């Protein structure tokens, strides 16, 4: 064999060895990628492998345990620290902000939050004109034509309880222990008149179940509908949600620490994290006041050449208001709880946040078996005192924000089931590199949140004011 032929076969052997080594390397790399993807269920993987343990756990192969590894193998293990910290920083000082962070929080895709509310249909109306019963009647009882301040809440086949007017026994002469009940036969919208007949009415002449005389301001309570045997259909019931709007306000606070201050020796530890905690507390106090008493507005800043949105507080969103005199007694507290828990189909467990004057008056009351103060309870990270009645339970909490705003004797009852927080920008921190930009030799952090509070069912919430 010539030298030329020998070199030819040697080159072939070297090429085959090179190809073989290259193929093995590619296969090994592919195996690592595939195993990592299978473990993490992700199209991307990190430069290490995760294997499953005998009980379903994850184990790192050929690599240290880092945050990337943790997020890859157990995505829910690491929490967002700022969210945990903000709910732990003095929650008793900002009860409304604290409750809203645990209540229904929705992302707002815009700085303007539109929301819809559905109210309940009214159940009571008052007579605006007297009705005189006929002097005599024969045969079938005549229908009564009634004029109320809200005829539209009644439909044909509704039954009506006439509050404070006694009905009659079957003889039509003896007054009954039950109130008078009426049946709606027709509603004349053109003449604004309800035509009704009596269920337990009076006997006049030979006619039974006549409607007796009724006087103006008599209360008519709408009750259930009464259908006949052959009725298939019923008058329609429709409800439409009402649209409301609130503006998200951008809350910001900036904390800075110079480099020299950070490097200086100190008698007690005080660093940027301590300043950040104090800043969060101050920021939450400001947000608490805005969430309570803010005014929804769009104002023009001539220096910034742009509009600034301010959020509307829930104080004016509440659909009810109750006042009390200089002295708050147990009877008045019962009336307050009655108004707060009735007529709105809300929860039977609500929150009373008030100033020091109102809380002081509540503490001075002599509670009875009807209204009593129970033990303290902790909810949403806040310590409340329970006040119970037959109407419902109030979780009472002092808010010094009312004192700071000159409303120490006032308070608000809120239903936590019907309060919603809209966040356009969730609470977050951002580090600014002011050194690199040549502005200041400091470490800087900016705290930001863009949000607003809304009461989705206004009549479930009530203001308490002192006259």
Image: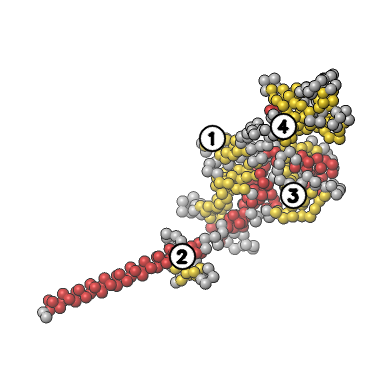
Q: CA distance from mark 3 to mark 1?
A: 45 Å
Residue 15 disc label: none
Which residue is label 4 attached to? 158
Q: CA distance from mark 4 to mark 1?
A: 60 Å
Which residue is label 1 attached to? 302
Mark 1 neighbour density, 10 Å: few (under 14) some (14–19) many (20 or more): few
- Give x and y (percent) for residue 131: 80, 22
- Give x and y (percent) for residue 148: 74, 25
In primary-sequence order, the first of circles 2 and 3 is 2
Q: Nearer the viewer, mark 1 or mark 2?
A: 2
The quadrant of the picture occupied by the C terminus is top right
In primary-sequence order, the first of circles 3 and 1 is 1
In primary-sequence order, the first of circles 3 and 4 is 4
Picture residue at 77% right of the left edge, 51% below the top: 386
Q: Nearer the viewer, mark 4 or mark 1?
A: 4
Mark 2 neighbour density, 10 Å: few (under 14) some (14–19) many (20 or more): some
Q: Quadrant of residue 186?
A: top right
Q: CA distance from mark 1 to mark 2?
A: 57 Å
Picture residue at 56% right of the left edge, 39% below the top: 112
Q: CA distance from mark 2 to mark 3?
A: 48 Å
In primary-sequence order, the first of circles 4 and 2 is 2
The quadrant of the picture occupied by the N terminus is bottom left
Q: Is residue 188 visible?
A: yes
- Residue 240 higher or lower than 430, as above or below: above
In primary-sequence order, the first of circles 1 and 2 is 2
Residue 395 disc label: 3
Mark 3 neighbour density, 10 Å: few (under 14) some (14–19) many (20 or more): many
Q: Give the SS element for disc 1.
A: loop
Residue 39 disc label: 2
């Amino acid at each position: 064999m010539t030298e030329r032929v020998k070199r030819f076969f040697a080159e072939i052997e070297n090429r085959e060895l090179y190809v073989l080594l290259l193929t093995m390397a590619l296969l090994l790399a592919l195996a690592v990628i595939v195993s990592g993807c299978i473990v993490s269920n992700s199209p991307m993987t990190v430069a290490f492998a995760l294997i499953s343990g005998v009980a379903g756990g994850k184990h790192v192969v050929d690599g240290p345990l880092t945050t990337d590894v943790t997020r890859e193998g157990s995505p829910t293990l690491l929490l967002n620290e700022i969210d945990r910290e903000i709910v732990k920083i003095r929650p008793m000082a900002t009860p409304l902000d604290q409750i809203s962070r645990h209540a229904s929080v929705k992302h707002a895709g815009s700085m303007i939050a539109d929301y819809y509310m559905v109210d309940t249909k009214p159940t009571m109306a008052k007579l605006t004109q007297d009705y005189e019963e006929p002097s005599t009647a024969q045969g079938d009882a005549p229908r009564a034509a009634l004029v109320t301040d809200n005829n539209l809440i009644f439909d044909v086949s509704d039954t009506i309880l006439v509050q404070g007017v006694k009905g009659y026994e079957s003889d039509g002469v003896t007054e009954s222990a039950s109130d008078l009940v009426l049946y709606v036969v027709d509603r004349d919208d053109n003449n604004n008149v309800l035509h009704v007949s009596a269920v337990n009415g009076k006997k006049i002449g030979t006619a039974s179940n006549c409607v007796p005389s009724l006087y103006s301001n008599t209360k008519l309570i709408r009750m259930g509908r009464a259908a006949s045997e052959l009725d298939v259909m019923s008058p329609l019931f429709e409800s439409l949600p009402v649209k409301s709007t609130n503006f998200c306000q951008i809350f910001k606070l900036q904390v800075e620490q110079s480099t020299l201050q950070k490097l200086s020796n100190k008698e007690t530890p005080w660093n940027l994290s301590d300043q950040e905690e104090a800043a969060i507390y101050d920021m939450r106090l400001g947000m608490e006041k805005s969430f309570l008493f803010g005014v929804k507005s769009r104002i023009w800043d001539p220096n910034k050449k742009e509009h600034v949105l301010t959020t509307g507080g829930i104080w004016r969103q509440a659909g009810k208001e109750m006042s009390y005199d200089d002295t708050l007694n147990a009877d008045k507290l019962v009336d307050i709880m009655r108004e707060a828990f009735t007529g709105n189909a809300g929860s039977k467990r609500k929150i009373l946040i008030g100033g020091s004057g109102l809380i002081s008056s509540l503490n001075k009351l002599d509670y009875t078996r009807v209204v009593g103060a129970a033990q303290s309870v902790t909810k949403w990270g806040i310590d409340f005192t329970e006040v119970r009645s037959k109407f419902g339970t109030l979780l009472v909490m002092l808010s010094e924000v009312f004192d700071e705003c000159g409303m120490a004797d006032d308070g608000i009852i809120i239903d936590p089931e019907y309060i919603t927080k809209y966040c356009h920008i969730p609470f977050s921190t951002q580090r600014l590199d002011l050194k690199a930009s040549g502005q200041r030799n400091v470490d800087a952090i900016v705290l930001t949140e863009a949000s607003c509070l809304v009461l989705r069912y206004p009549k479930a919430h009530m203001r308490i004011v002192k006259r």
